[in-house]
Amino acid sequence: MILSEFTRLNPKFEAVMCFCFDKNANLILLQKRIDHQFYPGLWGIPAGRVENGEDITDAVMREIREETGNEVPEEMLKLVLETNHKHIIKGGEKVLYFKGYTFVSKMKLEKIILDKKEHVACARLKPYIVPAINIKVMIPDTLRIYELLQRKGELRYHKRSD
């Protein structure tokens, strides 16, 4: 859950996420394994924790590489949003607070090589379909951030390239 109000939280970790598109301006989504600790079975974008001593840009480049098999250079990434999140782990027995950094890749990804330790499928969606997705199949924060970035015009340069 994205925390909209100012809150004095002590984030347990930082996380990065990146909206990636293909040459046809389709959003690339990855489906988490059903036994994954966070958001099992749900669809989302390349994302993960920032490792100790790691810069957020290096972290997002690593996550894209690990989760899609693509090398996206730093100059092709744009940091577009910083958010505070509250994550409730299965059944509500544990709550984690974390700081999130959302990037958009200006590089069009073609071939996706999934990390089978994390994901079971990849989908490419037309941007106009994304808001119509049932929130129960998509990581909730991913959909909310997508809609926010659309309103802010941060995804406007992702047009089809032939």
Image (spheres, rainbow, N blue to C red):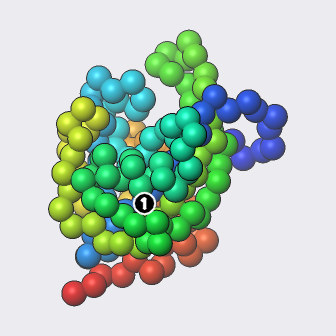
The residue pinned by badge 1 equals: 19
Q: Quadrant of residue 11?
A: top right
From the image, which quarter does the C terminus lie in? bottom left
Q: List x then y, in percent, for residue 69.
A: 24, 53
Q: Is residue 125 left or right of residue 50?
A: left
* Depth order, front residue of 90/65: 65
The picture places residue 123, in percent across and down from the top left corner, at 23, 54
Q: Quadrant of residue 109?
A: bottom left
Residue 42, position as x, y percentages in the image: 34, 38
**Residue under the point 59% across and 64% down:** 80
Q: As displayed, is residue 160 above or below residue 9?
A: below
Look at the numbered disc 1 and give the secondary structure of its residue.
strand
Figure quadrant of the N terminus: top right
Q: How many marks?
A: 1
In the image, taking residue 147 as reference, residue 131 lies left or right, namely left
Q: 137 or 72: which is nearer to us?
A: 72
Q: Bin the neighbour count of mark 1 within 10 Å (Cα to Cα): few under 14, some 14-19, many 20 and up.
A: many
Mark 1 residue type: Phe
At 60% across and 33% down in the image, what residue appears? 13
Give x and y (percent) for residue 26: 30, 68
Q: Is residue 120 visible?
A: yes
* 52, above or below 128, in the image: above
Residue 134 in sight from this viewpoint: no
Q: Nearer the viewer, residue 162 or 134?
A: 162
* Residue at the image point whose x is 61% and y is 71% from the top: 152
Residue 90 vertical position relative to residue 31 in the rendered view, above or below: above
Q: Quadrant of residue 38?
A: top left
Residue lying at the far bottom of the rendered structure: 162
